[in-house]
Amino acid sequence: MPEGMAGPVSEGEDRPVLKRALNMGEDGDWQGMADTLLEALEDDPDDPVILCWLGTAERELGLEGVAYERFRRCLAGQPEDPLILATAGTALASFDDPEAEPALRAAAKLAPNLSAVRWRYGAFLSREGLFDDALRELDAARESAPEDPTIRFERAVALGLKGDLDEAAEELEACLELEPSHDWALLVLGLVRVELGEVDAAALALVEGARERPEDVEAQCLAALALAGLGRDGEAYEMVERARMRAEGAHKSLVAEVEERVEEGSDEALAFLHGAMAPSTLRERFMARP
């Protein structure tokens, strides 16, 4: 999913150490942010605000287990700040923790006009299959912050999971108008275009997304299949090679299968893209938690 410190920080928070740490997070310096907050935590080990943002930094660093415990301790401290509740709740949702939903619901009730809270709750509800409730939250968030690309992306997720792919594509386009470098949205848009049978448009989005995410082996494979389906074999083989350079484990088998489909010609490449790869990959990327 998209990286970074999306949305505002805690309202009313004016501690210099926290401001410094959050600025580091905005710059992508997650290690610096974590180190700064670890020092701050020594003065108050149960501070829910410090625990929340420390967990955020540690999650970005790949320390999932440690981050999980930070978020649990954060909520155990019964914070009243709605953004802290929503941030911790969103993080716990990625661990399928049952404490996620009440934290997100409470945040939405406490701050109905704060878009960063409403979209987080909407994002949770859409992945739980509660699409109408999700869209109600996301519509409220969009009304408060119409220029926020994250909200448009999450509306696309809700619509896509609901089965409204045409509307999902429109929301993804709106997201990309607001944030052209949103590489995750590019790939999801490409997959939606595949499902809609729009191969030319799908290839355009998938190739651009794959080039923006060179470490994403699946993205290279999807782009290769779409290009092969259009008869652009030279570019397709380039994408296969890009995938091969990054592939490890099970991805090596995927790359080999994609290369075989490309070699078999456009019909086989498109059949594999439409029938085997795009539907499951689209759902996985829709279901990825923010």
Image (cartoon, rainbow, N blue to C red):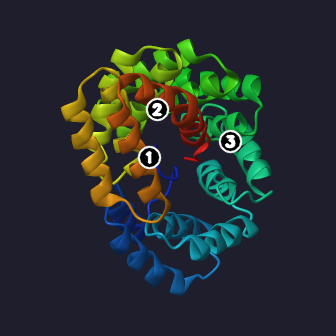
* 59 vs 122: above or below: below
Q: How crowded is mark 2: few (under 14 residues within 10 Å), some or many (20 or more)?
A: many
Q: Write the residue at 47% across / 47% down.
A: 1
- In the figure, is residue 275 to the left or right of 180? right
Rounded to the nearest angstrom, the CA distance separating label 2 from label 1 is 22 Å
In this rendered view, identify the residue nearer to me: 245 or 83: 245
Residue type, numbered disc 1:
Glu
Question: Which percent across, then down, holds residue 231?
Answer: 27, 22
Question: Which percent across, then down, holds residue 112?
Answer: 67, 33
What secondary structure is marked by label 1?
Answer: helix
* 252 vs 143: above or below: below
In this rendered view, identify the residue nearer to me: 66 or 16: 66
Q: How many marks?
A: 3
What secondary structure is marked by label 3?
Answer: helix
Residue, disc 1: 257
Q: Is residue 76 visible?
A: yes
Extreme residue in the left direction: 234
Of the residues under marks 3 and 2, which one precedes in the sequence? 3
Question: Which percent across, then down, holds residue 110?
Answer: 71, 42
Q: Nearer the viewer, mark 2 or mark 1?
A: 1
* 290 vs 144: above or below: below
Rounded to the nearest angstrom, the CA distance separating label 3 from label 2 is 18 Å
- In the figure, is residue 240 to the left or right of 47? left
Q: Can residue 178 be seen in this view?
A: no
Residue, disc 2: 188
The tag on residue 124 is 3
* Residue 247, quarter of picture: bottom left
* 49 vs 211: above or below: below
Residue type, numbered disc 3:
Phe
Q: Residues within 10 Å of mark 1 (few under 14, many from 20)?
A: some
Of the residues under marks 1 and 3, which one precedes in the sequence? 3
